[in-house]
């Protein structure tokens, strides 16, 4: 009999939230359905559960139980995009992959005929887990024979389970406690009164009584528990990549002519996207020049789109900075596609005062003209020195701002890319210590020192930081380096 494996990514939305906010892992965290006080909690981590914060509660109620609760919305488009990425990654391990329509983060994979590629199914399952561990996603793999048995057995917490016989799989599935199944609390209370504790107890109930007392969902669950409702693996057919390649009969040096030729091919690709009900999310362009060189460009619009004018504008901005004097003799293009988000499918949508879509379009134009890494944000990280406590990362998507009313404005520290050497104080300085030069004025107030010492694992560091107020430049952030015996300007205070 053919083998199949169930691969579950438990609490996928919560995993995505914690992957984006690494500093939240030791705090109570919840995923909410909307950014409102009356939002419903969808998923919570163990720290939130320890504070009696549970899925189904209102956000305001959860905050009254746990004031330090951190919550955020994970949109349906983000979940869909992650599901598509997981689906593509799983196709590297098996050609047949089926995604659950009811549960995001649950997949069934064809596990037959892999003996020539992997020494054992344990090695195959371990390879899958290592792949997604590197992506920051936690998964569990159960290899068995049925949809129901493998899905139920992912709930016992073990990361890898392999079953060689169908009856053994069913025996282990029947040991699962009913509380681990996705059943409503009132229904679990009814089963508890009937003495039904495990799935085996549930399977022994008479089918006629189940049909008479419960709805169709419970009847279907009973049929699967008794192995009366079996369905084969229904893998999603892989989509052929949308691409084209063309060899030109002559050297094309004119940008406008080249763009017109690319637009003709993009119109054909857009027609295929419409047939598939997909959107263009990125465009990979390869140009082969007469001198033998090859030029590659990757474009990404603000949002997945079918707006050809927007894509052509980005193409023009990107190719204007390319040297095409050698002449283009070959063109190849490949389109990466995405499913439309729920917001894009809505007939009417509410427009906020701040148009995030316009902001993303502006960022896409900047990336097209200056490169993919032209738009970056500062991300915090662990570091010993001020300049090592943040790093610049590429901006993925701009989130909606949630300003808070504060009584006392915070001071801002501007950190220089590289500390600047400044003059040292002198005893016989008629105008005082001119740390910022004549234009900055003399030092009027000095606060500190605040010692930063350490770094013995790389090189010894001993710095004495001070806040200095000058007559014209305001507050400056300086430090004295004991090793070099010099003063440096770290930044300024605003």
Image (tube, grey):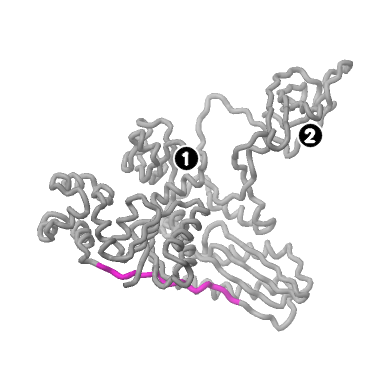
Q: Residue at x 29, y 60 (%)?
A: 149
Q: Which residue is mark 2?
A: 420
The span shown in magenta is 230-244
Magenta-colored stretch includes residue 234: yes
Task: Say few, some or many: other residues with alpha carbon within 10 Å of mark 1 (under 14 / 14 to 19 / 20 or more).
Answer: some
Q: Secondary structure at mark 2?
A: strand
State which quarter of the image contains the N terminus.
bottom left
Q: Residue at x 61, y 50 (%)?
A: 394
Q: Choose top left, top right, bottom left or bottom right for residue 310.
A: bottom right
Q: Is residue 33 above or below residue 234?
A: above
Q: Residue at x 34, y 43 (%)?
A: 40
In the rendered structure, the answer to whether residue 49 lies left or right of residue 297 reads left
Task: Say few, some or many: other residues with alpha carbon within 10 Å of mark 2 (under 14 / 14 to 19 / 20 or more).
Answer: few
Q: Which mark is residue 307?
A: none
Q: Residue 314 in the image: state x and y as whole percent.
A: 63, 62
In the rendered structure, the answer to whether residue 199 lies left or right of residue 34 reads left
Of the pair 450 and 492, the residue shown nearer to us? 450
Q: Residue 440 in the image: state x and y as whole percent.
A: 80, 26
């Amino acid at each position: 009999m053919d083998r199949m494996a169930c691969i579950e990514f438990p609490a996928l939305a919560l995993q995505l939230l914690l992957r984006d906010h690494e500093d939240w892992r030791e705090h109570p965290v919840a995923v909410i359905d909307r950014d409102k006080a009356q939002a419903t909690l969808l998923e919570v981590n163990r720290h939130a559960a320890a504070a009696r914060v549970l899925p189904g509660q209102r956000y305001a109620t959860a905050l009254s139980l746990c004031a330090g609760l951190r919550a955020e919305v994970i949109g349906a488009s983000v979940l869909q995009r992650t599901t598509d990425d997981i689906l593509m990654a799983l196709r590297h391990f098996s050609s047949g992959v089926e995604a659950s329509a009811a549960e995001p983060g649950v997949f069934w994979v064809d596990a037959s005929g892999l003996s020539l590629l992997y020494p054992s199914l344990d090695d195959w399952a371990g390879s899958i887990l290592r792949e997604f561990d590197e992506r920051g996603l936690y998964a569990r793999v159960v290899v068995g024979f049925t949809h129901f048995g493998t899905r139920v057995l992912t709930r016992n917490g073990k990361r890898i389970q392999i079953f060689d016989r169908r009856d053994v799989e069913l025996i282990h599935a029947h040991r699962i406690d009913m509380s681990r199944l996705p059943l409503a609390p009132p229904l679990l209370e009814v089963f508890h009164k009937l003495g039904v504790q495990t799935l085996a107890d549930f399977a022994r109930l008479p089918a006629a009584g189940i049909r008479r007392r419960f709805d169709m969902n419970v009847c279907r669950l009973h049929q699967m528990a008794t192995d009366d409702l079996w369905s084969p693996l229904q893998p999603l057919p892989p989509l052929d990549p949308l691409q084209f390649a063309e060899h030109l009969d002559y050297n094309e040096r004119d940008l406008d002519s080249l763009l017109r030729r690319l637009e003709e091919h993009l119109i054909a690709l857009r027609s295929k996207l419409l047939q598939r009900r997909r959107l263009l999310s990125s465009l990979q362009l390869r140009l082969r020049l007469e001198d033998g060189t090859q030029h590659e460009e990757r474009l990404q619009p603000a949002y997945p789109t079918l707006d050809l004018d927007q894509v052509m504008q980005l193409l023009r901005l990107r190719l204007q900075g390319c040297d095409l004097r050698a002449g283009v003799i070959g063109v190849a293009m490949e389109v990466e596609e995405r499913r439309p988000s729920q917001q894009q499918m809505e007939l009417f949508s509410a427009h906020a005062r701040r148009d995030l879509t316009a902001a993303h379009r502006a960022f896409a134009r900047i990336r097209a003209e200056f490169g993919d890494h032209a738009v970056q944000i500062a991300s915090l990280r662990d570091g010993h020195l001020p300049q090592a406590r943040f790093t610049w990362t590429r901006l993925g998507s701009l989130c909606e701002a949630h300003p808070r009313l504060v009584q006392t404005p915070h001071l801002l520290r501007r950190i220089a890319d590289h500390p600047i050497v400044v003059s040292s104080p002198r005893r016989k300085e008629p105008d005082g210590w001119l740390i910022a030069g004549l234009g900055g004025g003399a030092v009027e107030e000095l606060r500190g020192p605040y010692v930063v010492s350490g770094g013995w694992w790389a090189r010894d560091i001993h710095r004495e930081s001070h806040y200095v107020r000058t007559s014209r430049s305001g507050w400056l952030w300086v430090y004295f380096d004991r090793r070099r015996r010099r003063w440096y300007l770290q930044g300024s205070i605003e």
